[in-house]
Amino acid sequence: MAVPAFRRLWLAGLVSDTGDWLMFIALPLVVLQLTGSAVGTSFAFLLELAPPVLLAPVIARVTDRLSHRLVMVVAMVGQALTLLPLLLVHAASDLPVVYGVIVAQASFGAFFLPAKNALLPTLVGLERANSANALVGLNNDFGRIVGGPLGGVLLAVGSLSAIALMDVASYVVAAALVLSLPRRTNPGGPPSTNPSVPKPSGVLHALNDRPTLHLVLVNTVASVAQGLFLVLFVFFVTDVIRGNEADVGLLRGVQAIGAIGAGLALGVLGAKINALRLTLIGASTFTVITVLCWNASFVTHAVPLYALLFATIGVPAVFMGAGLTSLLQQATRGAHRGSAFAALGLGQAIGQAIGITAAGLLQEPLGTLPLLEVQAGTYALTALLAFVLLPRRSRAASGRPALSEPAPSSSG
């Protein structure tokens, strides 16, 4: 936080994430109101996952070859503009407009995240990446606490148009903050020794790098578990532990408590913690708490116990997320970070799509709890892969020049 450019980037993320949660809560409810179908709502979630998969090759090349600051600003302006058609949504016949907005939002957002993750180490240095990634991750949790409830209230007492305009305003403010970041004289990384020869880039080039491939694989398996959770969570609360709608909201919200605590702790101590160790601790603890959470239902249905478990699970989620992001930033040169994070986004979208689809198709014939045991097993597989593959990444990268990244230019 002592770096002025990082403070502006962090504040931009906080503003835009709060606006995102307004819309994240409102749009599925609007789709449900217009269709009266849970299938329509699931389809809306799947639409969000298509752009990171289909656009991955384009995202990789754009984020490698253009200024990360420019890509972020254009992405946020694009997201602001594509929200405006929601002002015309009033009836079920307008549902295609809602789906179109979801796809457009996800398309521009797919460019924003790789650019941000590639830019961040150039602002604070790799030695402070753990702290910076954890603090940036806090924005999503702060945004959830503020924007989530506010989105539901505004939709109940106001209209989708009011929410859309507030989200547009959040993107405009965030874009202005990112635009104020200092220009980098060398945004892609070290200059090529032969500028006439284009640098190899792209998702396939990133995945040909074994350390990057291992990190993407670990994150993809974890994303399968996350996709299963997104669908099965409500069924667990309502069918397994016999909770009501208020309990659903409570247990979804308390996840931010542990995440905020962990993010603040890492913000202070992250520079002193090895990113690999942070990832392994996060993956292992995530598995243990998940197993405890689902199997405690055989003993008790007391909601306070699950509130405690769901609040606690936010801690390893932050550890694993910040650790994986820092490891990928360390393992790649600035010139190829965009491709690496595009590959990470591709794997994450595919993993979530697999989890969401499997849960939707199998929940009724197999039941909620058996599928949640599979979900816990998927996190166990994530931890196993992290222990087997990521230490190799660390050893393989230890002698690579990519870890000795040149200092950012004075203008950056």
Image (cartoon, rainbow, N blue to C red):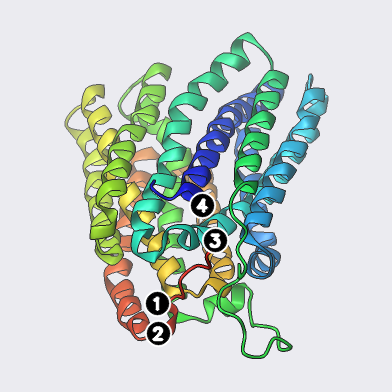
Distance in Å between CA atoms under marks 1 and 4? 30 Å
Name the amino acid type tagged 3: Gly
Q: Residue furthest front?
A: 410
Lower position in the chain sequence, tag 1 or tag 3: 1
Coordinates of residue 188 in the picture (x, y in percent): 60, 71
Distance in Å between CA atoms under marks 2 and 3? 24 Å
Report the number of discs: 4
> Can residue 36 be seen here?
no
Lower position in the chain sequence, tag 2 or tag 4: 4
Callout 3 crowding tier (Cα within 10 Å): few <14, some 14–19, many ≥20: some
Distance in Å between CA atoms under marks 1 and 3? 19 Å
Secondary structure beneath dot 3 equals loop
Distance in Å between CA atoms under marks 2 and 4? 32 Å
Name the amino acid type tagged 2: Arg
Determine which of the numbered discs, if any, sits on residue 403 in the image. 1
- The reply to whether dot 2 and dot 3 touch (C-beta < 8 Å) is no
- The reply to whether dot 1 and dot 2 touch (C-beta < 8 Å) is yes
At 46% from the left edge and 62% from the top edge, which residue is drawn? 121
Q: What residue is pinned by disc 2? A: 400
Coordinates of residue 44 in the picture (x, y in percent): 65, 39
Front label number (1 vs 3): 3
Secondary structure beneath dot 1 equals helix
Front label number (2 vs 3): 3
Coordinates of residue 335 in the picture (x, y in percent): 58, 74
Left/right of residue 148 with respect to residue 317 in the rendered view: right
Location of the C terminus by quadrant is: bottom right
Left/right of residue 354 with respect to residue 71 in the rendered view: left
Q: Quadrant of residue 192?
A: bottom right
Lower position in the chain sequence, tag 2 or tag 3: 2
At 56% from the left edge and 74% from the top edge, which residue is drawn? 189
Above or below, 223 relative to 275: above
Q: What residue is pinned by disc 4? A: 352
